[in-house]
Image (cartoon, rainbow, N blue to C red):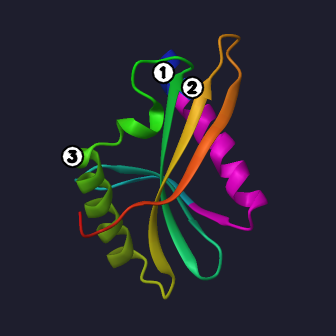
């Protein structure tokens, strides 16, 4: 049986995927894995290929969800994106986004922020 953190993470990813669809993106892949790590969502809109890291945190947590994507995690995402692009070549412009999901005290999930171009591949 999945743990509570996994269930909340999946629900947060679903919330972000629905947001992206409303913005005109097609969800190409969820939870793409390589030996370097995992990318939560890969989405395209005809010109952009967004590699999206979804972070969910309790409202009022010491570290906000968007601040919790550090350099090590960024490098893992970049390396995993390179594996994705080798496997699925595209003409789309790659971009690294971070979606911040707040978990309210009643358990409701809210998309608190969506950061396009949150970091670059040169990091």
Q: Which mark is residue 72?
A: 3
Q: Are marks 3 and 1 in contact (CB under 8 Å)?
A: no
Residue pictured at 65% horizontal, 11% vertical: 105
Most distant residue in the bottom direction: 91
Residue pictured at 39% horizontal, 25% vertical: 63
Q: Main secondary structure of the magenta part?
A: helix
- Looking at the picture, tell me which residue is in the foreground, 13 or 75: 75
Q: Secondary structure at mark 1?
A: helix
- Looking at the picture, tell me which residue is in the foreground, 79 or 86: 79
Q: Quadrant of residue 112?
A: top right
Please count the marks in the image.
3
Q: Which residue is mark 1?
A: 5
Q: Where is residue 55 shown, x and y percent of the image?
A: 48, 37
Q: CA distance from mark 2 to mark 3?
A: 23 Å
Q: Quadrant of the C terminus?
A: bottom left
Q: Is residue 50 visible?
A: yes
67 shown above or below 121: above
Q: CA distance from mark 3 to mark 1?
A: 21 Å
110 shown above or below 25: above
Q: Secondary structure at mark 2?
A: helix
Q: Residues within 10 Å of mark 1 (few under 14, many from 20)?
A: few
Q: Where is residue 88 shown, x and y percent of the image?
A: 43, 77
Q: Are marks 1 and 2 in contact (CB under 8 Å)?
A: yes
Q: Where is residue 19 shown, x and y percent of the image?
A: 71, 51
Chain part drawn in magenta: 9-28
Q: Which mark is residue 8?
A: 2
Q: Residues within 10 Å of mark 2 (few under 14, many from 20)?
A: some
N-term-proximal mark, 2 vs 3: 2
Q: Are marks 2 and 3 in contact (CB under 8 Å)?
A: no
Q: Is residue 2 visible?
A: no
Camera-nearest label, 3 or 1:
3
């Amino acid at each position: 049986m999945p743990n509570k953190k996994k269930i909340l993470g999946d629900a947060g990813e679903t919330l972000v995927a629905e947001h992206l669809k409303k913005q005109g993106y097609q969800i190409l892949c969820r939870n793409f894995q390589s030996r370097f790590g995992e990318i939560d969502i890969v989405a395209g809109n005809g010109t952009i290929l967004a590699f999206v890291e979804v972070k969910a945190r309790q409202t009022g947590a010491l570290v906000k969800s968007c601040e919790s994507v550090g350099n090590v995690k960024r490098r893992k995402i970049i390396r995993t994106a390179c594996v994705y692009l080798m496997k699925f070549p595209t003409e789309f412009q790659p971009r690294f986004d971070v979606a911040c999901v707040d978990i309210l005290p009643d358990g409701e999930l809210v998309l608190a922020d969506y950061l396009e171009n949150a970091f670059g591949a040169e990091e």
